[in-house]
Image (spheres, rainbow, N blue to C red):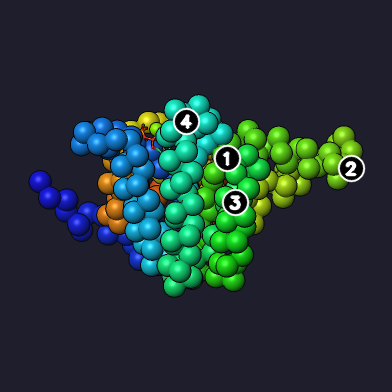
Amino acid sequence: MSKQKQEFTVIAGQNIPRHIAIIMDGNGRWAKKRFLPRFAGHAKGVKAVGKVAKACVDRGVEYLTLFAFSSENWRRPPDEVSLLMKLFRKVLVGEVKNMCANNIRLKVIGDIGRFDEDLQKLIHDTEEKTAANTRLTLTICANYGGRWDIVNACNALLRSGVQPGEITEEILSEHLSMSYAPPPDMLIRTGGEARISNFLLWQMAYSEFFFTDTYWPDFDTDSLDEAILSYQKRERRFGRTSEQLVKEGLAAGQ
Ligand code: IPE
Ligand code: IPE
Ligand code: MG
């Protein structure tokens, strides 16, 4: 049965999440279902990234953060890891023009010191080339782990000479690798699993979660709109009651 488009039409301009984070999962299973090597799923997944980034630009999303390679993904077979690195290089080189055409600023966060030096340089160069773009900040999380991020922030604080009792939530947040962005309003995970897999642990304290069985390579503009529509129907209470939100003018759309 064909998808009823109307069902997924987002409420334009109203309560669009400022920051969407995505765990792009299911590339391997997408390929397996088609009797293709896992890598074919990763390659197709890159195409979905381009489409979703453009759709976010069109919808006025300001930050899109994508989990591309986790601290734990080094445990994969070495040939899959090296193919993923090759693909990452290819995307950085090939997409810089498109990013600039769409006014997209690229950021890469994670422990990139573990990557080959030429890849590290390519990451920095691409970040620099897109640094002045203002419409959407696209963050790629590469060799990223939420625990690594928190430990990294603690070490940075200690190096700065912070004393016991001086650390606050605000100060710690400022030392996390995505301190330039507000916390994600919504987390989308494709591929049917309902877990965080060591993604943005600190930053997701109040994110709205949206899990879908769709494999990442099949995730398209309609899938994004379905997620945004679900987000728009939710009431974010941040500990308050519904009645308080209405009274204090904090309810969505107020
Ligand atoms: C996500 O897809 C991409 C990465 C982790 C790099 P997977 O490769 O995890 O796909 P599945 O979960 O095996 O289907
Ligand atoms: C999470 O996917 C990491 C990325 C999408 C990059 P995985 O497929 O590696 O997650 P687990 O190991 O199944 O939880
Ligand atoms: Mg997976």
Give whichever of discs 2 and 1 has the lower sequence position: 1
Q: Is residue 28 visible?
A: yes
Query: Callout 4: 10 Å neighbours few (<14), some, many (20+)?
Result: few
Circles 4 and 3, Cβ within 8 Å, touching? The answer is no
Q: Which residue is mark 4?
A: 78
Circles 4 and 2, Cβ within 8 Å, touching? The answer is no
Camera-near label (3 vs 1) is 3
Residue found 55% across the figure and 70% down from its top: 133
Q: Which residue is mark 3?
A: 118
Q: Residues under labels 2 and 1: Cα distance?
A: 26 Å
Q: Residues under labels 3 and 2: Cα distance?
A: 33 Å
Q: Which residue is mark 1?
A: 144
Residue found 56% across the figure and 61% down from its top: 126
Eyeballing the image, is 243 above or below 106?
above
Q: Amino acid at mark 3?
A: Asp
Q: Amino acid at mark 4?
A: Pro
Front residue (pair 224, 128): 128
The percent position of residue 65, horizontal first and vertical second, equals 50, 51
14 displayed left or right of 63: left
Eyeballing the image, is 47 above or below 162?
below
Q: Which residue is mark 2?
A: 161
Q: Is residue 224 visible?
A: no
Camera-near label (3 vs 2) is 3
Give whichever of discs 3 and 1 has the lower sequence position: 3
Query: Callout 3: 10 Å neighbours few (<14), some, many (20+)?
Result: few
22 displayed left or right of 9: right
Front residue (pair 193, 104): 104
Look at the numbered disc 3 and say if its residue's Cβ is closer than 8 Å to ligand 1. Answer: no
- What kind of element bears circle 3? helix
- What kind of element bears circle 4? helix
Give whichever of discs 4 and 1 has the lower sequence position: 4
